[in-house]
Each structure stands twice: as structure tokens, then as C-alpha cells.
Image (tube, rainbow, N blue to C red):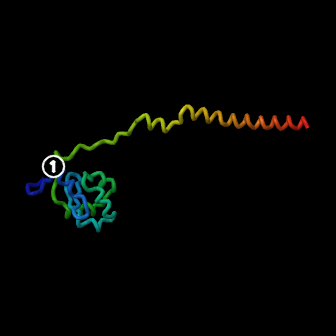
């Protein structure tokens, strides 16, 4: 970081996330991309969605060209104080019993799946037996 560069705190960066004032944090550097919103090839919504947070992963996942990286320099306004950036939350899959119960059919459901075909089969044999009995009586 040079001596004349502006240093922002993360809380200030978060305030700049609308169409009239849009800042991005990428690799510890702050960019004011408000003037670039309409020109961004991916559309302004992409930049607006990445504003107000650390957009480094969003930026890197796209695989920007060297030209795009050079173009960023004209929007550079300073750096963020790394000590003010909140720790990233790691996604942890939920393992609740409710989710597990929804995935596996219950015991009652399994019994019904077994008994319904047997009842239908029994009913069919019963009708057949009654039909033969009526024929022999006439």
C-alpha cells in the first residue's frame, strides 16, 4: 500500500451498493464502479449483487480477461483495512432430523406399500371365486 492511497473500513464500503454509488471489494482493493455499471458486459445486476461484500470470489470465478483486469485500474479508489473485514462464514450443511425424515419414507408408508397390492390381489381372487360359485349354482 502506497503512502498516498486511501484506506477504507469495511463498514464504509458496505454503504456503497446501489446504482448511484456502487463500490466493489476485490482482493483487498476498493473500486468505484458506478460509472461502469451500464458498460459491464455481464450487466449492472452482476456488479450490484457483488457490492456491499467481498466480491473477490465472484470476480475470480468468472475468469476475467487480462484486459478486464487492466480496465479495473481506472476505477480503483483505495484499499480496505483488512482488520475490519468480517470473518467469512463457511457454509455448513444442515443435518436435522426433520430433513432426514422427509427423505426416507416412514415405516407406516412401507407397510401400506406392501399391503395395498396384497389386498388388491385378494379382492381379485375373491371376485373370481364368487364368479365361479355363482356359475355352479345356476
Q: Is residue 34 above or below residue 121?
A: below
Q: Is residue 65 left or right of residue 94?
A: left
Q: Is residue 90 above or below residue 62?
A: above
Task: Determine the image quadrant of residue 93.
Answer: top left
* Residue 33 percent across, percent down from the top left: 23, 62
Residue at the image point whose x is 38% and y is 38% from the top: 94
Is residue 3 or residue 119 the one in the foreground?
119
Is residue 62 or residue 122 the one in the foreground?
122
Task: Determine the image quadrant of residue 90.
Answer: top left
The crowding category of the residue bearing disc 1, from other C-alpha atoms within 10 Å (few below 14, some 14 to 19, many at least 20), is some
Secondary structure under tag 1 reads loop
Task: Determine the image quadrant of residue 72.
Answer: bottom left
Residue at the image point whose x is 65% and y is 36% from the top: 116
Is residue 15 or residue 5 the one in the foreground?
15
* Residue 56 percent across, percent down from the top left: 27, 52
Badge 1 is on which residue?
Answer: 81
* Residue 117 percent across, percent down from the top left: 67, 37
Q: Is residue 19 left or right of residue 129?
A: left
Is residue 91 or residue 96 the one in the foreground?
96
Residue at the image point whose x is 33% and y is 56% from the top: 62
Residue at the image point whose x is 27% and y is 65% from the top: 37
Amino acid at each position: 500500500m502506497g503512502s498516498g492511497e486511501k484506506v477504507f473500513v469495511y463498514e464504509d464500503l458496505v454503504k456503497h451498493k446501489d446504482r448511484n454509488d456502487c463500490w466493489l471489494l476485490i482482493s483487498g482493493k476498493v473500486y468505484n464502479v458506478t460509472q461502469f455499471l451500464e458498460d459491464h458486459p455481464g450487466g449492472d445486476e452482476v456488479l450490484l449483487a457483488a457490492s456491499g461484500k467481498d466480491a473477490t470470489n465472484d470476480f475470480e470465478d468468472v475468469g476475467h480477461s487480462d484486459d478486464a483486469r487492466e480496465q479495473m485500474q481506472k476505477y480503483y479508489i483505495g484499499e480496505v483495512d483488512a482488520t475490519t473485514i468480517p470473518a467469512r462464514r463457511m457454509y455448513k450443511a444442515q443435518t436435522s432430523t426433520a430433513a432426514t425424515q422427509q427423505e426416507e419414507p416412514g415405516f407406516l408408508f412401507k407397510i401400506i406399500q406392501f399391503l395395498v397390492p396384497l389386498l388388491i390381489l385378494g379382492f381379485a381372487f375373491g371376485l373370481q371365486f364368487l364368479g365361479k360359485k355363482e356359475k355352479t349354482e345356476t
